[in-house]
């Protein structure tokens, strides 16, 4: 049992490090694609998708919390709060989709997570700043969510089958999503 916990902790640490590396890569690519500084590609959310599909919901929740803590420590209270709002709503949508009695496509899964993440951040911004300002950004962030969700799907479609061969899934949730 202790060996299992140590392996889970080590895997979670590696996933968190991967998430932070992808977040750094996103921040470097944002100006290259001409995106606003607040808009990111969502690559680090692939790690949360992996955790909820191949590990368990608790691991995914830990990653969301660690990502928010990292944003808090490196970019401030507002960034940490918005990261938590977006990550929590995205994870909730992932869990709801996995609870459906039928299978869904990886595209729907990815896009739903991206849209939920953006909606969570908009709700957090509305709570911190103003409803009017959040409403102003809503159309742009929803369109960005569709685009980013599509990119996340394409990347995860390439990565997840290879990862499945190396690390067998511990969760049955993975079989409910078709990549």
Image: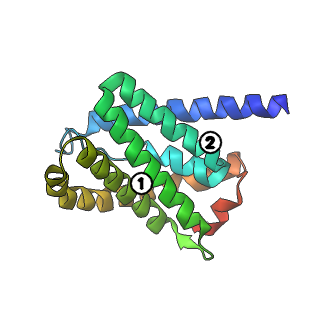
- Mark 2 nearby-residue class (10 Å; few <14, some 14–19, many ≥20): many
The answer to whether residue 155 of the structure is visible from this angle is no
- Mark 1 nearby-residue class (10 Å; few <14, some 14–19, many ≥20): many
Q: Is residue 150 left or right of residue 172?
A: left
- The percent position of residue 171, horizontal first and vertical second, equals 70, 55
- The percent position of residue 26, horizontal first and vertical second, equals 33, 38
Q: Residue at x 37, y 40 (%)?
A: 83
Query: Quadrant location of the C terminus?
Result: bottom right
Q: Count up the numbered dots.
A: 2
Q: Which residue is mark 1?
A: 152
Please state which of residues 147 and 173 is positioned toward the viewer in this rendering. 173
Determine whether label 1 and label 2 are within 8 Å by CB: no
Q: Residue at x 50, y 56 (%)?
A: 92
Q: Is residue 10 left or right of residue 92?
A: right
At numbered mark 1, what does the secondary structure look like: helix, strand or loop?
Answer: helix
Q: CA distance from mark 1 to mark 2?
A: 20 Å
Above or below, 9 against 145 in this view is above
Q: Quadrant of residue 114?
A: bottom left
Residue at the bottom extreme of this rendering: 102
Sequence-first tag of 1 and 2: 2
Q: Is residue 96 left or right of residue 110?
A: right
The answer to whether residue 63 of the structure is visible from this angle is yes
Q: Residue at x 56, y 36 (%)?
A: 15
Q: Which residue is mark 2?
A: 59
């Amino acid at each position: 049992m202790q060996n299992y916990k140590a392996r889970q902790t080590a895997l979670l640490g590696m996933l968190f490090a991967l998430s932070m590396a992808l977040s750094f890569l996103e921040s470097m690519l944002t100006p290259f694609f001409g995106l606003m500084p607040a808009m990111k590609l969502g690559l680090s959310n692939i790690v949360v998708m992996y955790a909820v599909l191949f590990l368990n919901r608790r691991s995914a929740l830990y990653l969301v919390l660690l990502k928010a803590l990292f944003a808090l420590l490196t970019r401030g209270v507002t960034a940490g709060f918005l990261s938590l709002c977006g990550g929590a709503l995205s994870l909730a949508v992932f869990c709801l989709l996995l609870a459906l009695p039928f299978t869904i496509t990886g595209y729907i899964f990815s896009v739903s997570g991206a849209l939920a993440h953006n909606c969570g951040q908009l709700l957090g911004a509305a709570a911190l700043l103003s409803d009017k300002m959040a409403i102003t950004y809503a159309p742009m962030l929803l369109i960005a969510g569709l685009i980013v969700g599509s990119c996340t799907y394409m990347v995860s479609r390439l990565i997840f089958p290879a990862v499945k061969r190396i690390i067998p899934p511990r969760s049955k949730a993975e079989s409910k999503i078709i990549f």
